[in-house]
Amino acid sequence: MRISVKELNKLLSEEILKKITSLGEICMNAGLQCYLVGGTVRDVILKVPQIDIDIVTEGNDKLFKDVSKKLIIKKIAFSQFNTAKLLFKDGFSLDIAQARKEIYPYPTSLPVVRRSSIHEDVKRRDFTINTLLMGITKKDFGKIYDYLGGIEDIEKGIIRALHKNSFIDDPTRIFRAFRFKERFSFRFDRETKNLMDNSIKAGYIKKLTPQRIRRELFLSLKEANWDKIIMNLSRSGVLKELGIKQKMTRSSITTFMRIIRNFNVTNQNWELSKLLIITENAQKKDIKAFSQKVGLRRNEVSILLELRRNGKIIVKTLSKKDLPNNKIYWLLEKIPIEGLFYLLGKGTPLSRKRIMLYFNNLKDIKINIKGDDLKKLGIKGGPIYKKILQKVLDEKLNGELKSKKEEIEFVKRIIYKPSQL
């Protein structure tokens, strides 16, 4: 199989194609093999427009010196795994990996990397659909090299692991398998599905570091079909391994997605909102266990626990018949936007209306007077300042104060009536 330049022009920008061609020329002049590899080639075959470019070569450090001389490179960032990220001055970046072999000292460990051949490099990858190579030198530009049946599996829509220890050596591949399944509407090869199930049941996912689990889970939450991925993670037992014992139901996810579409805020990923949906029926101790295993930050854990504890109370309060604006404000002002949109999916029509009132109006209301203004009125400093300013904000939220002058007049009235403070 060969991909024509015409086809590549539809999937790669002119600038990206130019950089790839230049890199191929540098490799050819140095007598080195050089290919597009992995997901980049997979997506080219599937006709998915490309931004992330991965290249593999059997080259050595001299290659990077040549690249620095002949291309407009801002920086080359090296990693511990024989890879380098080329950062161009125009903001574009691409990854170059030196062909390598990986050895896992023990299950779930990071691999020990050794330089190797291109043939060995493709064998270390996760799935056959990610083992394809595409030539980028003048002599083989666009030619696809397939050593492990990747093209056939792409055409059949199959996700196939490369070896029986794949999900034991690296259980993060389980998350990636579900992402690819839903992203491309593929299915699992039967043996691959059995290997995944066995790894999950044996508890290998729990042996991953929180940082690695977090990365894979958050990448899953960013996917267009994140809802299907999360349902798969629940049904397969992955979420249970991470502390969420209750099986997920589609109702909460469906409601949330409908609300996000209705309010035209689909340009954000809403990972925290999605985490709230995942943990909403879990016990406090399970949420804490999940948070530790997934490496959640303190503020993320705090909002998960807060809305698990008080979410229903907040919705019930927002559904009361007579509720002034200042009460709505103080009820919601410490909840991040992702929490508010989660609550939209839990509430009544009245509570939703009030959340949107806060979101669109109340949260941006500010008072004009400051502590210096209170000082000029002869009020001694101390905790009383906070009480007075909060009282002024309450009045403004309820529509009673329109200007700084009115705020000052209001303060003059209340400072002589301690009962109002």
Image (cartoon, grey):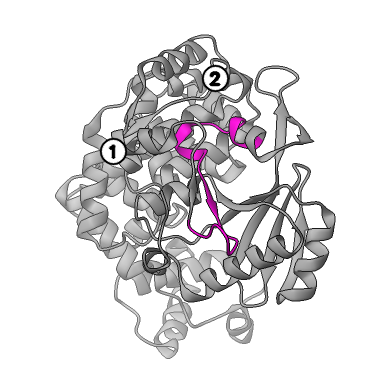
Vertical relation: 326 (above or below) 148: below
**Pair 2/1: label in front:** 2
Q: Identify the image quadrant of residue 262.
A: bottom left
Image spot of residue 393 (x, y percent): 43, 70
Judge by depth and name the residue closer to the eye, 49 or 122. Answer: 122
The count of marks equals 2
Determine whether, in the image, residue 359 is placed left or right of residue 125: left
Vertical relation: 74 (above or below) 1: below
135 drawn magenta: yes
For marks 2 and 1 on the same chain, the one whose residue lies earlier in the sequence: 2
Judge by depth and name the residue closer to the eye, 279 or 357. Answer: 279
**Label 2: how many Cα within 10 Å (few below 14, some 14–19, many 20+):** some
Q: Which residues are magenta?
A: 121-142
For the view shown, which residue lies furthest in the bottom direction?
A: 405
**Residue at x 36%, y 62% (from the top left corner):** 267
Q: Residue 293 got which mark?
A: none
**Residue at x 79%, y 34% (from the top left corner):** 114
- Residue marked by disc 2: 163
Amino acid type at image mark 1: Ser
Determine whether, in the image, residue 289 is placed left or right of residue 275: right
**Residue at x 48%, y 66% (from the top left corner):** 390
351 drawn magenta: no
Q: CA distance from mark 2 to mark 1?
A: 23 Å
Determine whether, in the image, residue 129 is placed left or right of residue 340: right
- Residue marked by disc 1: 185
**Label 1: how many Cα within 10 Å (few below 14, some 14–19, many 20+):** few
Determine whether, in the image, residue 4 is placed left or right of residue 383: left
Image spot of residue 420 (x, y percent): 42, 64
**Could you say whether the residue bearing mark 2 is in a helix, strand or loop?**
loop
Residue 270 visible in the snapshot: no
